Image (cartoon, rainbow, N blue to C red):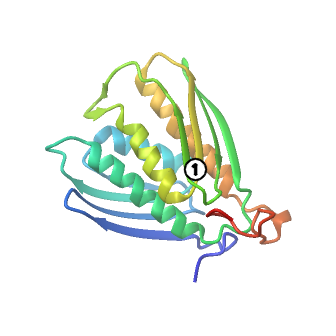
């Protein structure tokens, strides 16, 4: 049976194995922000830590990928697995606030996120990175992570960096803003009284 969004045991667990990656993910929506990350990519682990801490979701990600090629497959597939676990944990999404937004400043960088936990996936990515690499990561793979996450999670996700100079600050402000917007959107609205927050009576699909 799908989790009710007002069931305070909203949890999801996904194992995903392909010829390129093996990934195990668990997520607890109503957590404390604890994080256990082991992807083999230090900077990516740091960003996933921020996602957990600022959303107050408990997240565990263990991934083994073809890093001898590059980081693309591992990062993208972590997005798919994490999004799938999120969707599983959210169930029918009844009782949630549904919408979230956050403007987040990090030193000289300002990033903005607006999202709808609608069941209808879509990504708008307006983030220009000033350098091609951060640590071991090609900066272009951050878009692939959020694309995969939004698709699997069923989230309409708009991410924009308004300005910034330091690439670390730019991408970290994006992750933190996504986390804070998710925290707002998945919160239980007591005035919804357990209803699905849509005039259609359901979220997702083409209905």
Seen in the image, is 116 located left or right of residue 132? right
Q: Quadrant of the C terminus?
A: bottom right
Measuring from the top left, give residue 182's x and y in whole percent: 61, 50
Relative vertical location of residue 5 with respect to residue 45 in this rendering, above or below: below
Element type at mark 1:
helix
Q: Position of residue 60 (x, y in %)?
A: 40, 60
Most extreme residue toward the right, as rendered? 191
* Image quarter hosting the N terminus: bottom right
List the single residue furthest toward the front: 206
Label 1, on which residue? Answer: 55
Q: How crowded is mark 1: few (under 14 residues within 10 Å), some or many (20 or more)?
A: many
* Location of residue 95 (image quadrant): bottom right
- Residue 133 % position (x, y): 30, 27
Residue at 19% across, 61% down = 19
> Is 189 placed above or below 10 here?
above
Query: Which residue occupies 56% across, 43% down?
Result: 178
Q: Which of 108 and 66 is in front in this view?
A: 66
Vertical position of residue 75 compared to residue 95: above or below: above
Q: How far across and down, in percent of the image, does residue 58 sit?
A: 50, 59
Residue at screen point 21% across, 40% down: 70
């Amino acid at each position: 049976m799908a989790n009710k969004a007002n069931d305070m045991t909203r949890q999801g667990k996904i194992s995903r194995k392909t010829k390129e990656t093996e990934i195990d993910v668990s997520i607890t929506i109503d957590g404390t922000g604890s994080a256990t990350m082991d992807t083999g990519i230090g900077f990516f682990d740091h960003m996933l830590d921020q996602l957990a801490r600022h959303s107050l979701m408990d997240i565990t990600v263990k991934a083994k990928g073809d890093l001898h090629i590059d980081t693309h497959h591992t990062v993208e597939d972590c997005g798919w697995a994490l999004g799938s676990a999120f969707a599983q944990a959210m169930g029918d999404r009844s009782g949630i606030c549904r919408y979230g937004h956050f403007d987040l400043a990090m030193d000289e960088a300002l990033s903005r996120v607006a999202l709808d936990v609608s069941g209808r996936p879509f990504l708008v990515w307006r983030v220009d990175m000033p350098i091609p690499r951060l640590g071991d990561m090609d900066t272009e793979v951050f878009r692939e992570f959020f694309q995969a996450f939004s698709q699997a999670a069923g989230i309409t996700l708009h991410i924009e960096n308004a300005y910034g100079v330091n690439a670390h600050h730019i991408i970290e402000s994006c992750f933190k803003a996504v986390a804070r917007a998710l925290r707002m959107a998945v919160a239980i609205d007591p005035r919804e009284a357990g209803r699905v927050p849509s005039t259609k009576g359901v979220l997702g699909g083409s209905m």
